[in-house]
């Protein structure tokens, strides 16, 4: 096991003028599960491939366990990889697929058998060891790929969207299985996904990337509760954070005619207000301190009912009780949980607290 230190990494692909990675620095502690999250094209895979040694950086450096690996060939880095496509050998039985990296290391057969049995047990593949990949489900095939990656005692496990070929139900069950396995192994892991729920559920740390840069790097709940800018708030969460314009005055922040307390030092003027759907309550009509809103859409989801509402020109999502009785066109009174209000600079869209720190 080992930590990973990435310093000022820049990647410009030949023939391109754009930086696929633009001055990326991060430390991934020994045994940590780091998720690289962001929209398509933000540079997640590029970063992972440089850690793997499949791409070389334009500038910057990468160290694994204190060793500079920036220009080291892949096979000298002692890492394992799992990719989106199952990448198992179709003509080999499961046991031989899992054993493959051990055979190439020329380990004694008894040791290979022991490790294969261990990995198969961990991934619940023991009953399928003598099958061919074509005789397995998609989830089982992906488990074979994971088993093959973990039999070698790699310093680092790299995974690029390993769940993306699975259907929604299988994704969910395999996600928790993967979490259990990686926790058990304690291997330093870097995991690429564009799925924010996967990132929140798996990561010890999440790096949210945008246009080749890291927008925010923090534990998942910090990112959810305190996004560093409106991009992160709008990318994380389902539904994403609501944003509306407010006006900071001497008495507080005016939001649609309703004033909430302003933190000390907030400059007067326009401010972008962020609030999550679950931090908005539908209150009985006439409750003091509520904001009137018009219901646009009502979506019963079982555990809650999602309302799309309008406050003036702003549209918001509200996570209401499942048994709420409202219909499209109704006017409702909304109560915003003041504790959950996040403020962003109207121009830069950076979190107001984050700016104060800079
Ligand atoms: N081999 C390549 N040659 C030139 N440009 C590339 C190459 N690979 C990626 N890029 C570009 O680099 C940028 C980052 O791509 P990358 O694949 O790292 O993004 P990503 O966040 O992993 O996206 P996705 O989620 O779609 O896989 C994109 O603009 C992409 O078009």
Image: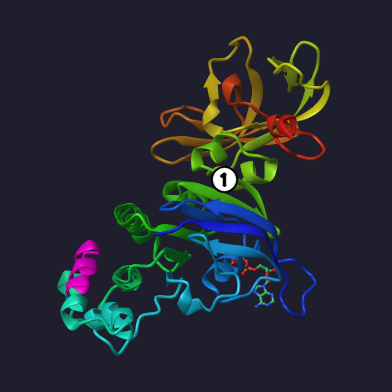
Look at the image and tell me whether residue 337 can be seen: no
Q: Residue at x 21, y 64 (%)?
A: 124
Quarter that holds the N terminus: bottom left
Q: Residue at x 40, y 79 (%)?
A: 87
For the residue pair 177 and 24, the one nearer the viewer reads as 24
Q: Main secondary structure of the magenta part?
A: helix
Quarter that holds the C terminus: top right
Percent position of residue 202, x then y = 42, 50
**Vertically, is 92 above or below 253?**
below
For the residue pair 280 and 228, the one nearer the viewer reads as 228
Q: Quadrant of residue 250?
A: top right
Highlighted range, magenta = 114-124
Q: Quadrant of residue 139?
A: bottom left
| Residue 190 horizontal side relative to residue 170, left or right | right
Look at the numbered disc 1 and give the secondary structure of its residue.
loop
For the residue pair 173 and 23, the one nearer the viewer reads as 23
| Residue 352 horizontal side relative to residue 70, left or right | right
Percent position of residue 356, x then y = 74, 29
């Amino acid at each position: 096991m080992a930590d990973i230190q990435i310093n000022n990494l820049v990647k410009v692909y030949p023939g391109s003028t754009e930086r696929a990675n633009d001055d990326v620095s991060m430390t991934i502690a020994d045994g940590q599960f780091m998720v690289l999250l962001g929209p398509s094209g933000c540079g997640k895979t590029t970063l992972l491939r440089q850690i793997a040694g499949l791409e070389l950086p334009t500038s910057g450096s990468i160290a694994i366990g204190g060793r500079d690996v920036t220009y080291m060939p892949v096979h000298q880095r002692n890492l394992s990889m799992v990719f989106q496509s199952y990448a198992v050998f179709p003509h080999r039985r499961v046991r031989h697929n899992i054993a493959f990296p051990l055979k190439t290391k020329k380990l004694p057969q008894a040791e290979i058998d022991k490790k294969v049995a261990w990995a198969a047990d961990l991934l619940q593949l023991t009953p399928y060891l003598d099958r061919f990949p074509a005789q397995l489900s998609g989830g089982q095939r992906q488990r074979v790929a994971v088993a093959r990656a973990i039999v070698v005692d790699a310093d680092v496990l790299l995974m690029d969207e390993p769940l993306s070929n699975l259907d929604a139900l299988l994704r969910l069950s395999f996600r928790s299985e993967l979490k259990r396995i990686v926790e058990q192994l304690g291997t330093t892991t870097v995991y690429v996904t564009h799925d924010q729920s996967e990132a929140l559920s798996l990561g010890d740390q999440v790096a949210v990337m945008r246009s080749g840069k890291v927008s925010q790097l923090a534990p998942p709940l910090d990112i959810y509760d305190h996004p560093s800018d409106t991009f992160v708030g709008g990318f994380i969460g389902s539904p994403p954070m609501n944003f509306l314009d407010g006006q900071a005055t001497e008495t507080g922040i005016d939001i649609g005619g309703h004033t909430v307390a302003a933190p000390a030092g907030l400059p007067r003027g326009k401010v972008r207000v962020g609030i999550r759907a679950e931090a908005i309550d539908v209150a009985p009509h006439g409750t003091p301190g509520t904001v009137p809103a018009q219901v646009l859409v009502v979506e019963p989801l079982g555990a809650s009912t999602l309302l799309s509402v309008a406050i003036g020109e702003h549209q918001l999502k509200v996570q209401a009780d499942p048994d709420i009785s409202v219909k499209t066109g109704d006017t409702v009174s909304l109560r915003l949980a003041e504790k959950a209000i996040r403020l962003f600079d109207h121009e830069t869209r950076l979190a107001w607290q984050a700016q104060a720190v800079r």
